Image: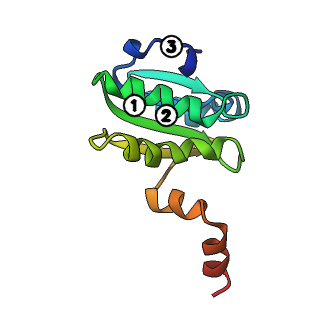
Amino acid sequence: MKTFLETNVYSFQGTVLLYGACLPEVSPAGFAKLAEQADGCYALCLERDHLNMAITKLTAVLGTGRVKQLLLATVDRSPHCVQMHYIPHEIERILPEHIPMESWVVIGDRPIRISPETVERSKSLAKLETESSR
């Protein structure tokens, strides 16, 4: 397993899959489906490592110009992993020109693409509460 924070920024290229470190163990078949789409797969554990470290590193990685697409994949319902899906918004704020980025959660053998709108709504508990009480 290649770990994201321990890999040199110039090692990343093409389509990169950044995944929650537990994903291959929890959902091996679903992880394998996403891994097939990537030129390189890198584990990140946001239970152990701070989100800001990942964002800073990823900004440097993308700054090399070698990465063409970023896929972010995690298990569903993890309070730590959900943070990974907030990375694209932060990257968009830092880098005015950025690459395509997609968020995925995996349930069993099924990867499910998560829209940027869903990720954004998940950051506002008050908005979710008022939407669900209608």
Q: Which mark is residue 37?
A: 1
Residue where numbered disc 3 is placed: 7
In the rendered structure, are the residues bearing label 1 and label 2 in contact, judged by CB atoms less than 8 Å apart?
yes
Which residue is painted at 42% across and 16% down in the image?
A: 9
Q: Position of residue 15 (x, y in %)?
A: 36, 28
Amino acid type, label 3: Thr
Q: Secondary structure at mark 1?
A: loop
Measured Cα–Cα span from mark 1 to mark 2: 7 Å
Position of residue 63 in the picture relative to residue 112 (left or right)? left
Measured Cα–Cα span from mark 1 to mark 3: 20 Å
Upstream in sequence: badge 1 or badge 3: 3
Relative height, residue 127 to residue 70 (above, below)? below
Residue where numbered disc 2 is placed: 33
Relative height, residue 14 to residue 8 (above, below)? below
Binning the other alpha carbons within 10 Å of mark 3 as few (below 14), some (14 to 19) or many (20 upward) gives few
Task: State the quadrant of the N terminus.
Answer: top right
Which residue is painted at 63% across and 72% down in the image?
A: 128
Relative height, residue 130 to residue 121 (above, below)? below
Upstream in sequence: badge 2 or badge 3: 3
Front residue of this view, candidates 32 and 40: 40
Front residue of this view, candidates 123 and 24: 123
Amino acid type, label 1: Gln
- Tell which residue pokes out farthest to the front in this image: 94
In the rendered structure, are the residues bearing label 1 and label 3 in contact, judged by CB atoms less than 8 Å apart?
no
